[in-house]
Amino acid sequence: MSNNEINNNDNHEKYWQANIKLVMWCLAVWFVVSFGFGVLLVEQLNAIRLGGFKLGFWFAQQGSIYTFLALIFFYVHQMNKLDKKYNVHD
Amino acid sequence: MELQTLTFLFVGLSFALYIGIAIWAKAGTTGEFYVAGGGVKPIFNGMATAADWMSAASFISMAGLIAFLGYDASVYLMGWTGGYVLLAMLLAPYLRKYGKFTVPEFIGERYYSQTARIVAVICLIFISFTYIAGQMRGVGIVFSRFLEVDIITGLMIGMAIVFVYAVLGGMKGITYTQVAQYCVLIFAYTVPAIFISLQITGNPLPQLGFGSTLAGDPSTYMLDKLDQVVTDLGFTAYTDGTQSTTNLFFLTMALMAGTAGLPHVIVRFFTVPKVSDARKSAGYALLFIALLYTVAPAVGSMARFNLINTINGEDVTGTEYTAMPSWFKTWENSGLLAWYDHNSDGKIQYAKGNPIEGKKPSFADDRGQYGERVVTNPGKGEIAKGAPFANELYVDRDIMVLANPEIAGLPAWVIALIAAGGIAAALSTAAGLLLVISAAISHDLLKTTFAPDISEKQELMYGRIAITVAIVIAGYLGANPPGWVAETVAMAFGLAASSLFPAILLGIFSKRVNRKGAIAGMLTGLIFTFCYIVYFKGVFFDPIGVNKPENWLFGITPQAIGGLGMVFNFVVALTVSHLTEEPPKEVQEMVASLRIPRGATEATAH
């Protein structure tokens, strides 16, 4: 294996680790807004009002979906940056 | 213009559009036939994915489900959108980098095993056919109600349209038709919702409308009023749940992972030019889906609100049958509404309780004293706990979206629009499913397994034959829906979550999972989930176990069990893999290359 290839593999490994870290953070948020706010904590959150909505109910039927959307576009943006940083973009 | 003329006009125009696109987008190569030549722009792929994904069930049934389940239906909203987060971050970009045609192909190659590939083909065909039966049924319902042709004629027309653009255009034709179908269905869904939201709350945005105050009473929020009205009738409050948290948890998980593991959705991401496009296009797909999914809960709550007020009237004593608007009689004629006058006062009352014995009403041939259809299987007419009177009204959930504009008294063109939208939703999903079935047969079974010598031209021909046969079978299933369709849709999600999703995910994120681990995992997930559902629901025969909470494992319903099946799949796959040898070096290198976006080429045969 040439030095170049080793550097390349090393670079790819770092890129992959950065990717995993990003995905883990995103999925943590994904889990909290849906399973957390929408299911497990719904009763506690329902004590809080958001206009005409109980907050837990709003997360379950609206808020989680908006958060998912924001998450994907955030992920796309960050990944494009990572692709460039590690010079692996297509 | 008359409602029926308008409906013919709208549906006819949309069909002309689909056929026009089909002629323009004729597929010439297997690449165009399977993955639209890999040149679809992310935003168009997003729209096509949204139409592909949003089926007759999303368009027709979901808001009805929400209307009657209230908070409990949230799991469908979260599950069917949250799956796209998994798809965008865990599957789509890597499968795009892989750059071949089908999902079984990936599984076969990653796990260096024809057996794994065949298992994947079986899962795929089973999942896809259960779905199609539902779509064709949706086409039939819309045709028979709005165009007043019988279900079979409606089905034949629907089949003919799909035939033209799917067989001719393959994935290319399907993609661009789906883009058009998305526009039709989202317009048809949101326009009536805006009207109704304005009517009830004065807010034109349905997403905000159902959290606003009532137009007639600015001091009361709509949802608070609805909560109060339904609890007065003996129901659980609309915004409260009745199901156990454990079950909601597993159901959400099964729906999310099932969504991400559905082959006809995954394959859409093979059609974009680059890896970064696959990510972006998953974002667009969710954006377009969210336009409908955030409106649906508003539609559901407002439909429930309107229905109760129309039936029970201002003073909550019921409305005389003879005074009901004409939509009531039309839907009664189709058997989706029924009334039995338990207290013999000539008025319809709606409250908690089952108005009939069993699940569906059956009717006598003659009419009753008010001109109503006579129900031959009435319930006992008992007053449910907390309800003011016995429930006399049977409502099929599926009519909530279709009848909603009529209940709200909207203009005829809005109602006609709903018909065109419902058909667009059903046809777009059916076409996507037909394509993955045909690709699995012509590409995975014939070209790679049983007849590797066929030329590209022949493969293309077999693909077209396979799609034709699949259309005929789908049409048959739509005309003679097996009693287990509803059960098998739950099964499709459970199976996708417990078999395909973990296998693909581990194939990308672990270099260590090998053939033995993957096959053992898939079979564990598949068999466990399948048996659990069959045990309680019965599929081809009567259920073995009584389907009630005391008998369920950890209180998990058969519908939600795929979430647990998925966990078993992961555990078995990882354990078996670590106890056995590493995958071959070239497979590990393939996994390494999947993880790097650079070097993605147009999807190729080999």
Image (cartoon, coloured by chain):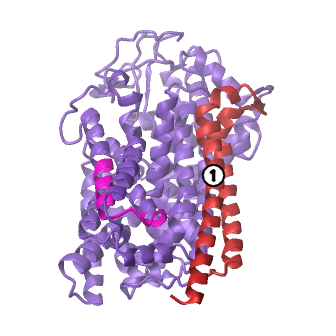
Q: Secondary structure at mark 1?
A: helix
User: Which residue is at a point 65% across and 43% down the rendered structure image?
Assistant: A33
Q: Quadrant of residue B229?
A: top right
Q: Position of residue B258 (x, y in %)?
A: 44, 52
User: Which residue is at a point 44% across and 69% down the rendered structure image?
Assistant: B267
Q: Position of residue A56 (x, y in %)?
A: 67, 33
Query: Residue B315, relative to residue B53: is it above or below?
Result: above
Query: Residue B588, relative to residue B354: is it above or below?
Result: below
Q: In the shown orientation, is residue B234 left or right of residue B359? A: right
Chain part drawn in magenta: B507-526
Q: Position of residue B190 (x, y in %)?
A: 63, 52
Residue beneath disc 1: B190
Nearer to the camera, B539 or B85: B85
Q: Which chain does the numbered disc 1 sit on?
A: B
Q: Is residue A16 visible?
A: yes
How many numbered markers are drawn?
A: 1
Q: Amino acid at mark 1?
A: Thr
Q: Residue furthest right?
A: B219
Quadrant for the C terminus of chain A in the image: bottom right
* Residue B366 on the magenta segment: no
Q: In the shown orientation, is residue B313 left or right of residue B334? A: right
Q: Is residue B128 visible?
A: no
User: Which residue is at a point 59% across and 44% down the rendered structure image?
Assistant: B296
Q: In the shown orientation, is residue B168 left or right of residue B305? A: left
Q: What tint does the image give chain A?
A: red
Query: Quick one: which chain is purple?
Result: B
Q: Position of residue B237 (x, y in %)?
A: 60, 22
